[in-house]
Amino acid sequence: MAPSDQSDFPVLIKITNQNDPVFANAQSNGDDILFTSSDGTTRLDHEIEYYSSSATKELDAWVRIPSLSSSSDTVIYMYYSNSG
């Protein structure tokens, strides 16, 4: 939790689990990976800093959270394997 509410807060999403399904299902360049707010529809700005679905299997993505509460969890979703 943050000490106070934050706006436009950058959050690092780092996945290094070799068995995570993102590596078997996302496009090889990670271009189909996207993040949404808890409504599952509102897309969140993000930047894929590093993505490898080959030997190293790693995802480093920065996601801008419009409003991060200091008193409750903020839920976001990651989607992949979607051409739209």
Image (cartoon, rainbow, N blue to C red):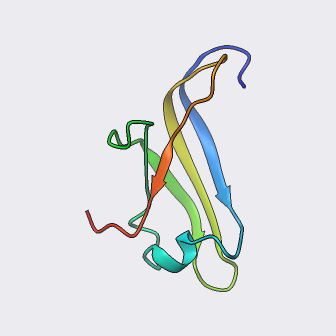
Residue found at the far bottom of this picture: 55
Q: Nearer the viewer, residue 27 or 48?
A: 27
The C terminus - image quarter: bottom left
Rendered location of residue 64, percent (x, y): 50, 37
- Judge left or right: residue 71 versus residue 76: right
Residue at the (63%, 21%) spot, across then down? 72
Q: Is residue 73 above or below residue 77?
A: above
Quarter-wise, where is residue 18 in the image?
Answer: bottom right
| Whether residue 63 is situated above or below residue 6 in the rendered picture | below
Residue at 71% from the left image edge and 22% from the top image edge: 2
- Residue situated in front as seen by the camera: 31 or 79: 79
Q: Quadrant of the N terminus?
A: top right
Image location of residue 10, percent across then percent down: 58, 37
Total numbered circles: 0
Question: Is 39 located above or below residue 26 in the figure?
Answer: above
Q: Quadrant of residue 14?
A: bottom right
Picture coordinates of residue 38, whole percent (x, y): 45, 36
Q: x, y percentage for residue 67?
A: 50, 23
Taking the spot 32% from the left edge, 42% from the top edge, the residue there is: 41
